[in-house]
Amino acid sequence: MSNSHTSSPSHLNNVVGDTLITRAVDNTQVPINTIYENQPAVIIFFRRFGCQLCRSYALKLSNELMPTLKANNVAFVGIGLEKFGLEEFMKEGYFKGDLYVDEGKKAYKQLGFTDLGWFRGITTLFTKSTRDWNAETTKMGVGGNLKGDGFQLGGTYIVGRKTGEVWLSHPQKDYGDHPEVSQMLDILKEKLPSFKSV
């Protein structure tokens, strides 16, 4: 298992498998394990649908990663912590995978994602990775807003099918902390012998 941070489950089933999330397209509730039941998955836990850094990360992955995932039958899934801003996020096409909402932040809490609080939330704006990602976001021309839960961090997971064996665990340390697309592709190539880049 490739692990960017110290504490991570070895399999998502052990921690959040039965946790219910709401599918954006039809508003039905399903357990998280349905995401990776039949295929490996890249799962992004977004901080906030209105966050411009989340939007640019979603757009980058949609452009640079999703075509390869689709060609290799790997699910591409985004989970947010509230419905607030979801409609605009979908309408503007930032994320081209399947979207869900974890109302009440159940999985966020179970996976131990950090809620920064007011003071750390403000100071985190000035970390190098946040400043770097903000510059990238500006170059991409992606905007956002400040509505909703602004201090909850998310994360990126790559998991295997059935049990959700964790191949990559990357809980965010700050707003701009994301794994590189090249790292994600390398892990998928290592774990899936037939995996081909597009």
Image: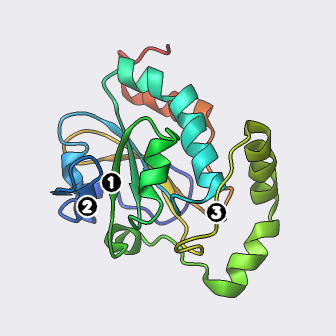
- Provide the secondary structure element on which disc 1 rests: strand
Circles 1 and 3: CB atoms closer than 8 Å: no
* Quadrant of the image occupied by residue 30: bottom left
Q: How is the image coloured?
A: rainbow
Q: Which residue is mark 3?
A: 145
Disc 1 to disc 2, how far (Cα)? 6 Å
Residue 1 can be seen in this image: no
Q: Earlier in the sequence, mark 1 or mark 3?
A: 1
Q: Which residue is mark 2?
A: 21
Q: Earlier in the sequence, mark 1 or mark 2?
A: 2
- Residue 146 drawn above or below residue 26: below
Disc 2 to disc 3, how far (Cα)? 24 Å
* Residue type indicated by callout 3: Asn
Residue 99 can be seen in this image: yes
Q: Which residue is mark 1?
A: 100
* Residue type indicated by callout 1: Tyr
